[in-house]
Image (cartoon, coloured by chain):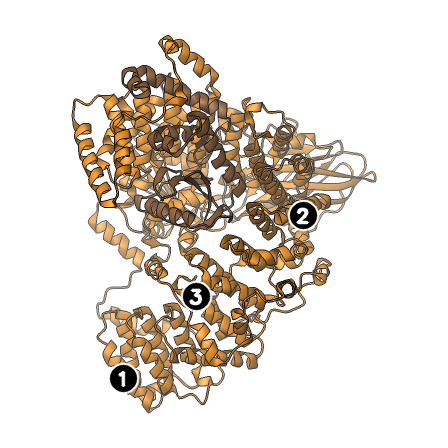
Chain colours: A brown, B orange
């Protein structure tokens, strides 16, 4: 089971956080701090896995953004890497050539995509098409309800 | 989902005209969020950022609290609030508005509202209660998107106590026509299963329906639940093995829709989930394993593409192959596969290869030998993670011959490691193997010194305990004992003479104890000198008062001779005014002792042979004193729990059972109300017995960290905190210096020589030969069944004369038994496997001749719902044809007895059974009636059950059954672990007309058969109630609404479940029962809002949950 997913920049700025077990704010802050320092300190050409307390940390860098996944220790590390990769693919499909800025400015979209992909700390849906359809579907509603405001935002 | 799209499109035709490119929602440059983000990026200092955000938060606060803000603006404000929180600034004023947005907004505002709620609040936040109604409403909505959102939020964070309120609605969604809803519902139930398993106990058979869902996605989702359930109770799901295998076969051969492919690999996540399930099912079970050999072979073959995901599958396959009952050619293939991993140039694969190897060497140490050069290379790998994994592997292959090299490598790593968790773990491992395989005394003491100084105060407490126990109990040879102790004393004197400031407290405690106990062995050592050294410790500022107590105890033992006495006196004068009471007590004792030489001689005779002291733990020698005091009018002693109870009664407000104020199960809401056992009970639903976790320090799970644990089974858990504090400090090793003082030892000179020498290859070869000794040719000898040729050096004495006195120590000292078992088994895999299998109950062979029994198996998983018709409790099985020849043995006639049910029948044999309830156990009577014309020979009946102890009670084992006759076997059943239903599995093998036959059967009996009334008084009940730690609460239906509904209901429970009603007062009643062999369970019932709030407690972990289930059934049935 996955415990958390964090996205942060090369400067250690948090871009997205998702927790699958209840934690206090203090614990979350500690984890975020530990993850950024540990992951950013990793040398090139080392493996993508780390140990943290009783958890396994799987991280991968995509351009300027680090994806960092905390899983229970008996989980399969390679599979964790692919979870990250599929999420990146999903973001890419939605935003079209996704970059860090997309995620900064539209982080709520990134959360919605994640919620369609993972649920209760497990994989829910792996199909890119299906997830994309779900999101697009809701987005279209969004434009309908807010069209003035959104039109300005989208095309203005 | 495509239907959803269609529906939406038709419902909103206006949309079609829009040039909608959802993916193009690029930088929202004009929005306020965009402005905020840009504003932040332009700033240069943290201080400026803080100012900007504070301004932003202030304006947000105004905006959200203004009545004129529209929902749309609110949504936009919420997004900004989320952003500020992500940057680490608190925006708690917006939480309530997030909930409001989720409640009142249109679909899209709602979506942001829900998102904000999940990001802002955690499961325990009080505001979440306000969300329950919204979720309820959305779950009932006809709009699919709303239902989806509600299910997502439910799975993300829903208060545990509120689950019953929405459970029926979520359950209902399992039948929803849309697969996406069904899938989300299954995952939400999975989450419920994780956080509150007993809440979803009754819908297990619904999960089965989800498993058979026509949509593979729903089926996949249900596997998450199945994996958990099978982990908890593998025996119950063996019948599903064939189904899982079939699913995997279909997946592997690409029968699923393309949608499920990931980089051309068919549904990898599904494959891996299935492989995990299979490995649990096939563990130690030959018959079940045989079903899966083919598909595992197929999976290995199919995974060819060079992609991470195929390697992930392969890894899981290999693990499965090595977990289940072994098959030679599969093992070979798996070994090759591991080779590919280990030899890969990709570092991630190498890592996984090492991990797999670590897992596998327990069964096949030779595999490590094959890859020894790679392992050596990994040992010097620049990546610490790889190094760490390699050490883990070495730990598994340690033996008496390679111990020094391996420990040296581990300590080398420890010196560099900065991670506390790693340090604790590794230090424990070094201590474990050092104790087991130490080659000589000096090495052992020095290694342990390093362990203590590196491990610092984070070290697991059983390491020092175990070490001291070893020193004090010693091993067979008295001469060796003395030598070891002398070594310890010498090395500690040297340590104390040097710099002591950096020594961890635990180490100082060990040193004090050893010096106090054994420094007299060194006859040329003046006790006064030791005293002086110890005094130095007392004077150090950083010495904790616990350590000071240890030091004083040591001084007490050493206090003889003029010089020592005067030192002791001066020390005591300082400390007798200490704030710490224990310390003050010790100081006074020492002071008295130092003033009275006669008492000293009497108390501390110089013993040459340390005979263990007799300890009278009942303190009976104080009886006279007590009776005198009582006669003089002193109050009698009350144990702590009784005092606590009385205290609670005095206040008369917060007695536990009265706290139920909400009409639902609410175990966690009483956290604030009570001190001791509730904290445990909150988590007991989650992980059975979670105090164990906190004791192990490192292994605390994340789930529990939200709760500050103050009380545990052993009282106030104060030790944890200082441990964590000290953990921050870096502890340089004082030992390397001390080593140099004592003269260079072999190991220390090795540690300092770098590996990179002119002939690195040769070095590696050397290292390899020293690391892998004892694995090669000899290991094949082990395979033949010989045990380890080198005896453990420190073999603990088997019998200790003072076992009662050392009971506490021995309980904590055994170095983690599981690991030890593993290690042992690595030496002789064959002999390990065989007994385990034969110990297992005769597992079902997927054979012929027993159709009827197999049918029985398929339906026999614990399926609680009556309505579903799956129920196969034996007494409901129809018993149409009378079998006149079956009658109970004379001894059992007259006892409560179930109907005799037919278990299975073949052409020759009918097997029937019934159970008889005796006072302290249950007797299972099995009738073998031979209806054929030939006798049965070599009849063998094997019976077993996972959670029951089964023992044969018939006088003579049956051999032959003559034609047309009945043989009767009796088995005594006693509960090992309570479950809702026990399942006895058996196999009958016999020869009839020179052919061998095997018949399998299962027999189910509910827990209620083991329940006996337990007669206690209300006072006894009260005392026990506080002492028991496992509890469960739930609201049940009342039987009647009449005047005495409580009495009626309790009488129904009494009648059906065999309980004893202790007392009924007003709206409350207490009941008690016990398992047949004396393990009690207490029930507290209380009428509230038309339901019966039942609270169960017991010292047995699973008893309350299981019994609660039967209570529920008993009341539903009326």
- Numbered disc 3: what chain? B
**Which quarter of the image is occupied by the C terminus of chain B?**
top left
B1065 or B1085: which is nearer to us?
B1085
Write down the residue under mark 1: B569
A107 or B1115: which is nearer to us?
A107
Regarding mark 2 in the picture, which secondary structure is present there? helix
Regarding mark 3 in the picture, which secondary structure is present there? helix
B673 or B95: which is nearer to us?
B95
Identify the residue at horizontal 58%, vertical 78% (top origin): B477
Foreground label between 3 and 1: 3
Eyeballing the image, is B1075 above or below A106? below
Please tell me in which quadrant of the rendered image residue B940 appears.
top right
Please tell me in which quadrant of the rendered image residue B561 appears.
bottom left
Q: Is residue B884 visible?
A: no
Write down the residue under mark 3: B454
Report x, y in % for residue B233: 54, 41
Residue B335, numbered circle = 2
Calculate the distance from the C-alpha at mark 1 to the C-alpha at mark 2: 69 Å
Eyeballing the image, is B5 above or below B115? above
Which of the two discs, 1 and 2, labels the residue nearer the N terminus?
A: 2
A11 or B116: which is nearer to us?
A11
In the current view of this chain or complex, which residue is farthest to the bottom? B562
Foreground label between 1 and 2: 2
Identify the residue at horizontal 33%, vertical 87% (top origin): B564
Calculate the distance from the C-alpha at mark 2 to the C-alpha at mark 3: 37 Å
Q: Are marks 3 and 1 in contact (CB under 8 Å)?
A: no
Report x, y in % for residue B539: 28, 76
Report x, y in % for residue A106: 35, 29
Q: Is residue B616 left or right of residue B394?
A: left
Q: Are marks 1 and 2 in contact (CB under 8 Å)?
A: no
Please tell me in which quadrant of the rendered image residue B1117 appears.
top left
Q: Is residue B280 left or right of residue B68?
A: right
């Amino acid at each position: 089971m996955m415990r958390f997913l964090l996205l942060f920049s090369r400067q250690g700025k948090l871009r997205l956080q998702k927790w699958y077990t209840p934690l206090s704010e203090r614990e979350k802050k500690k984890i975020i701090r530990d993850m950024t320092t540990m992951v950013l300190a990793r040398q090139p050409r080392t493996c993508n896995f780390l140990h943290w307390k009783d958890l396994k940390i799987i991280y991968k860098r995509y351009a300027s953004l680090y994806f960092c996944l905390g899983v229970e220790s008996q989980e399969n590390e390679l599979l964790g890497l692919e979870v990250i990769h599929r999420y990146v693919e999903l973001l890419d499909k939605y935003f079209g050539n996704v970059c860090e800025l997309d995620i900064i400015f539209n982080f709520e979209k990134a959360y919605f995509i994640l919620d369609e992909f993972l649920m209760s700390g497990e994989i829910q849906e792996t199909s890119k098409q299906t997830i994309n359809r779900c999101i697009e579907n809701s987005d279209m509603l969004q434009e309908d309800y807010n069209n003035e405001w959104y039109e300005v935002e989208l095309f203005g | 989902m495509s239907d959803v799209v269609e529906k939406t499109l038709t419902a909103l035709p206006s949309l079609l005209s829009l040039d909608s490119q959802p993916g193009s929602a690029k930088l929202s440059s004009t929005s306020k969020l965009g402005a905020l983000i840009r504003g932040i990026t332009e700033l240069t200092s943290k201080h400026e950022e803080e100012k900007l955000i504070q301004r932003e938060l202030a304006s947000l606060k105004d905006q959200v609290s203004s009545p004129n803000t529209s929902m749309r603006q609110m949504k936009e404000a919420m997004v900004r609030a989320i952003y500020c929180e992500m940057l680490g600034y608190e925006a708690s004023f917006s939480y309530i508005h997030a909930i409001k947005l989720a409640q009142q907004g249109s679909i899209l505002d709602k979506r942001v509202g829900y998102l904000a709620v999940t990001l802002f609040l955690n499961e325990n936040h009080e505001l979440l209660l306000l969300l329950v109604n919204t979720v309820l409403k959305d779950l009932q909505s006809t709009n699919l998107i709303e239902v989806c959102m509600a299910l997502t939020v439910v799975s993300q964070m829903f208060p545990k106590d509120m689950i019953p309120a929405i459970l029926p609605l979520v359950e209902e969604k399992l039948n929803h026509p849309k697969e996406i809803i069904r899938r989300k519902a299954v995952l939400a139930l999975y989450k419920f299963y994780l956080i509150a398993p007993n809440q979803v106990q009754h819908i297990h058979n619904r999960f089965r329906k989800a498993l058979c869902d026509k949509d593979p996605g729903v089926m996949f989702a249900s596997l998450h639940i199945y994996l958990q359930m099978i982990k908890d109770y593998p025996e119950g799901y063996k019948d599903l093995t064939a189904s899982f295998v079939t699913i995997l076969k279909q997946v592997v051969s690409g029968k699923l829709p393309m949608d499920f492919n990931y980089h051309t690999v068919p549904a990898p996540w599904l494959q891996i989930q299935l492989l995990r399930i299979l490995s649990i099912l096939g563990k130690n079970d030959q018959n079940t394993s045989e079903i899966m050999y083919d598909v595992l072979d197929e999976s290995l073959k199919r995974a060819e593409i060079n992609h991470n995901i195929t390697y992930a599958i392969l890894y899981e396959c290999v693990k499965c192959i090595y977990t289940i009952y072994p098959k030679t050619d599969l093992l070979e293939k798996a070994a090759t596969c591991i080779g590919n991993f280990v030899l890969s140039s990709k570092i991630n694969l190498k890592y996984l290869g090492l991990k797999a190897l670590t897992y596998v060497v327990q069964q096949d140490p030779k595999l490590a030998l094959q890859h020894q050069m790679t392992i050596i290379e990994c040992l010097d790998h620049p990546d610490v993670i790889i190094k760490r994994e390699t050490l883990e592997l070495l730990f598994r292959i340690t033996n008496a011959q390679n111990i020094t090299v391996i420990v040296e490598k581990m300590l080398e790593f420890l010196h560099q490691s900065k991670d506390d968790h790693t340090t604790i773990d590794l230090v424990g491992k070094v201590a474990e193997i050092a104790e087991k395989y130490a080659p000589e005394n000096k090495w052992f003491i020095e290694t342990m010194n390093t362990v203590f100084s590196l491990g610092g105060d984070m070290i697991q407490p059983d390491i020092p305990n175990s070490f001291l126990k070893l020193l004090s109990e010693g091993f067979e040879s008295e001469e060796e004992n003395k030598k070891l102790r002398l070594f310890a004393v010498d090395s500690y004197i040297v340590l104390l003479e040097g710099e002591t400031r950096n020594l961890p407290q635990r180490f100082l405690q060990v040193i004090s104890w050893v010096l106090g106990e054994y420094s007299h062995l060194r006859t040329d050592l003046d006790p006064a000198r030791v005293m002086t050294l110890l005094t130095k410790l007392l004077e150090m500022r950083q010495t904790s008062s616990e350590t000071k107590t240890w030091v004083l105890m040591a001084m007490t033992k050493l206090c003889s001779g003029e010089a020592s006495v005067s030192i002791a006196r001066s020390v005591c004068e300082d400390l007798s005014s200490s704030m710490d009471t224990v310390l003050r007590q010790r100081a006074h004792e020492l002071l008295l002792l130092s003033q009275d030489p006669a008492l000293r001689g009497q108390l501390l005779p110089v013993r040459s042979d340390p005979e263990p002291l007799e300890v009278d733990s009942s303190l009976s020698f104080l009886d006279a004193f007590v009776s005198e005091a009582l006669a003089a009018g002193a109050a009698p002693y009350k144990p702590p729990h009784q005092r606590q109870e009385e205290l609670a009664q005095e206040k008369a407000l917060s007695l536990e059972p009265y706290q139920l104020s909400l009409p639902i199960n609410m175990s966690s809401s009483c956290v604030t109300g009570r001190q001791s056992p509730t904290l445990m009970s909150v988590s007991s639903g989650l992980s059975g017995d979670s105090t164990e976790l906190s004791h192990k320090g490192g292994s605390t799970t994340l789930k529990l960290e939200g709760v500050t644990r103050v009380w545990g089974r052993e009282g106030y858990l104060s030790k944890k905190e200082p441990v964590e504090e000290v953990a921050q400090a870096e502890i340089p090793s004082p030992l390397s210096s001390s080593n140099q003082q004592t003269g260079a030892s072999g190991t220390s000179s090795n540690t300092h020589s770098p590996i990179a020498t002119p002939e690195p290859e040769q070095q590696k070869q050397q290292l390899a030969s020293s690391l892998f000794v004892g694995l090669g040719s000899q290991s094949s000898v082990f395979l033949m069944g010989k045990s380890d040729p080198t005896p453990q050096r420190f073999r603990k004495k088997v019998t200790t004369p003072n076992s009662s006195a050392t009971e506490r120590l021995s309980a904590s000292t055994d170095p983690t038994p599981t690991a030890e078992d593993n290690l042992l088994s690595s030496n002789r895999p064959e002999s390990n496997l065989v007994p385990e299998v034969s110990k297992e109950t005769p597992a079902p062979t997927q054979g012929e001749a027993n159709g009827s029994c197999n049918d029985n198996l398929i339906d026999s998983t614990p399926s609680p719902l009556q309505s579903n018709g799956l129920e196969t409790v034996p007494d409901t099985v129809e018993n149409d044809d009378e079998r006149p020849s079956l009658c109970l043995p004379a001894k059992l006639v007259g006892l409560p007895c179930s109907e005799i049910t037919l278990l299975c029948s073949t052409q020759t044999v009918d097997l029937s059974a019934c159970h008889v309830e005796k006072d302290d156990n249950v007797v299972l009577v099995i009738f073998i009636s031979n209806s054929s014309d030939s006798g049965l020979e070599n009849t063998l009946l094997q019976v077993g059950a996972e959670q029951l102890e089964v023992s044969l009670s018939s006088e003579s084992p049956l051999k032959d059954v003559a034609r047309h006759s009945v043989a009767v076997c009796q088995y005594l059943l006693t509960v090992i672990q309570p479950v809702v239903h026990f399942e006895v599995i058996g196999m009958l093998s016999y020869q009839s007309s020179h052919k061998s036959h095997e018949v399998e059967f299962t027999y189910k009996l509910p827990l209620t058969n083991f329940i006996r009334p337990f007669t206690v008084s209300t006072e006894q009940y009260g005392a026990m109630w506080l002492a028991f730690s496992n509890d469960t609460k739930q609201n049940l239906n009342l039987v009647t609404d009449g005047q005495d509904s409580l009495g009626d209901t309790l009488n129904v429970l009494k009648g059906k479940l065999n309980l004893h009603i202790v007392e009924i007062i007003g709206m409350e009643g207490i009941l008690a029962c016990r398992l047949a062999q004396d393990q009690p369970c207490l029930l507290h019932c209380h009428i509230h809002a038309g339901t019966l709030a039942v609270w169960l407690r017991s010292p047995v972990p699973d008893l309350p949950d299981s019994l609660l289930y039967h209570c529920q059934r008993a009341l539903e049935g009326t």
